[in-house]
Amino acid sequence: MFRPALAGFDIRISDFSCEGGRAIGNEAGEKRIGIFGGTFNPIHQGHLRGAEEIREAFRLQEVIFIPAAIPPHKRMRGIIEIHHRFEMVRLAILKNPRFRASDVELKRPGKSYSIDTIRHFLKEYPDSHLFFILGRDAFMEIETWKDFQGLFSLSSFIVMARPGFHETSHGAQLPKGLIRFFRYDQKLKAWLHPSGHALHFEEITFLDISSTKVRELIEEGKSVKYLIPAEVEAYVQKHGLYGKIGYTNNTKENE
Ligand code: ATP
Ligand code: MG
């Protein structure tokens, strides 16, 4: 596990190897792994591009995509079976050697809590530094997550922000209940937790795509080309997913 050099708020800047003003970690040779959970109903280019930019910016060896079998904060209506969602994630990332799909939340009975998933990966990679990746919408609700305090003790966090996002040191971008647990480090340009883990906000080329939008287009029989990977589009078509009237758009030109 990532072990900060000092407990409490006495973390010295020199304990981190800084690159671009960012806390990367303080142990040479430590494995840095991105954990990217979501409903992925279905996975789209916004997820993929975001994860790729974060992987590069934070020099992550690997980003693990983890579809939630039972997302604790979403109504299950309209969420298709996990094996389809998992398969689409698997197909979407197949050609990226730095991306991996994990079925850990498929195998675990009950709701898919991130805290259990983080614990799982800390066991699998005991000497790693985990970076939990999420969008701002998800992050703003984090106080409703099971044992959210524990999350910050076990993992660093990277919040993907839209272009034009302004980081402040007074915590305007944090959910109110979190401010007292963090302090802003000007040099690292990150928020530090007493555990030594960091909370980063990283501006990405935010593609304004959502799974909701993709599902709506499919339902209307419209094209989703270039919003989702071609492999995912083919899978959706093959299995007749999402469409009330069937997803038939553009099939003719492929014949
Ligand atoms: P839905 O519309 O069904 O809520 P979604 O597109 O938000 O779907 P999720 O599976 O809910 O996708 O999101 C998984 C994670 O990806 C969340 O942390 C979310 O904030 C983030 N995310 C969603 N859309 C984007 C995007 N376009 N770019 C970067 N991150 C995104
Ligand atoms: Mg969402």
Image (spheres, helix red, strand yellow):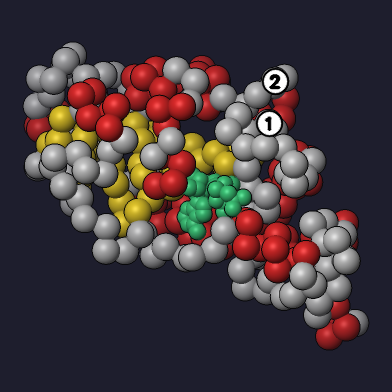
Q: Amino acid at mark 2?
A: Gly
254 or 163, which lies in front?
A: 163
Label 2 close to label 1 by CB (< 8 Å): yes
Residue 144 position in % (x across, y down): 46, 27
* In this view, 4 is above or below 38: above
The residue singled out by tag 1 in the image is: 70
Question: Would you say 136 lies left or right of 215 here?
Answer: left
> Of all residues shown, which one is farthest toward the bottom?
253
Q: Amino acid at mark 1?
A: Ile
The image quadrant that residue 238 belongs to is bottom right
Task: Count residues near mark 2 (Cα–Cα under 10 Å), then give few for <14, some for 14-19, many for 20+.
Answer: few
Q: Residue at point 36% right, 36% down?
A: 157
* In this view, 229 is above or below 94: below
Number of marks drawn: 2
Task: Count residues near mark 1 (Cα–Cα under 10 Å), then give few for <14, some for 14-19, many for 20+.
Answer: many
The image quadrant that residue 254 belongs to is bottom right
Quick check: can you spot residue 205?
Answer: yes
Give the numbered dot on residue 110: 2
Q: Residue at point 57% right, 42% down?
A: 38
Question: Would you say 157 lies left or right of 28 here?
Answer: right
Give the numbered dot on residue 196: none
Q: Residue at point 20% right, 50% down?
A: 167
- Disc 2 from disc 1: Cα separation: 7 Å
Residue 20 position in % (x across, y down): 18, 51
Residue 193 position in % (x across, y down): 24, 25
Question: Would you say 75 lies left or right of 161 here?
Answer: right
Q: Residue at point 35% right, 42% down?
A: 158
Quick check: can you spot residue 1?
Answer: no
